[in-house]
Amino acid sequence: MKMHLNVTGRVQGVGFRYTTYQMAVEIGLTGTVKNEDDGSVTIEAVGTKEQMEQFLTKLKKPQNPFAKVSHIEQYEDPTIKDYNQFNVVY
């Protein structure tokens, strides 16, 4: 399963990308997480349906006390490449 996620809220300047990276690696996903110019964060995630459900559940309630997720726009995107690992894009 290949998902494109765009997360809005207080998600930049608060370590959100790093905690997202940690969650993805813990769950076994591959892909990327990066800040966008509009203040949102984009995630490309590749994994099983079960992994994705677990990731989305955790993403909605970040363990990072400074981050706050307001909305997650998500859709399956078969054009996402197969990544070897999960990376933070700077």
Image: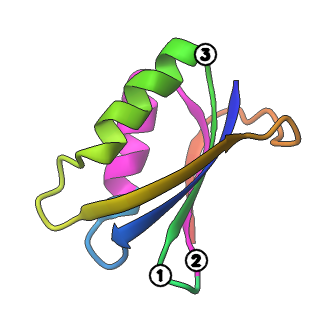
From the image, tell me which residue sits under label 2: 36
Task: Tell me the kind of residue under disc 1.
Answer: Gly
Q: Which mark is residue 39?
A: 1
The quarter of the picture where the C terminus appears is bottom right
Mark 3 or mark 1: whose residue is earlier in sequence = 1
- Looking at the rendered structure, the secondary structure element under dot 1 is loop
Residue located 41% across and 59% down the image: 71
- What is the spatial separation of the Cα atoms under label 3 and label 1, in whole angstroms? 28 Å
Q: Within 10 Å of the Cα at label 2, are there few (<14), some (14-19), or many (20+) other Cα atoms?
A: few
Q: Would you say residue 27 sits in the magenta stretch? A: yes
Query: Of callouts 3 and 2, which one flags the residue occurring earlier in the amino acid sequence?
Result: 2
Q: Residue at x 24, y 49 (%)?
A: 62
Above or below: residue 84 compared with residue 44: above
Q: Which residues are magenta?
A: 18-36
Is 18 situated above or below 80? below
Residue 42 position by quadrant = bottom right
Which residue is labeled 3 in the image? 48
Label 2 to label 1, Cα distance in Å?
A: 6 Å
Q: Are marks 3 and 1 in contact (CB under 8 Å)?
A: no
Query: Which amino acid type corresponds to the residue marked 3 in the rendered image?
Result: Thr
Q: Please, which residue is most extreme toward the bottom here? A: 37
Camera-side residue of 19 and 74: 74
Asked if the residue under mark 1 is in contact with the one under mark 2, i.e. CB atoms within 8 Å, the reply is yes
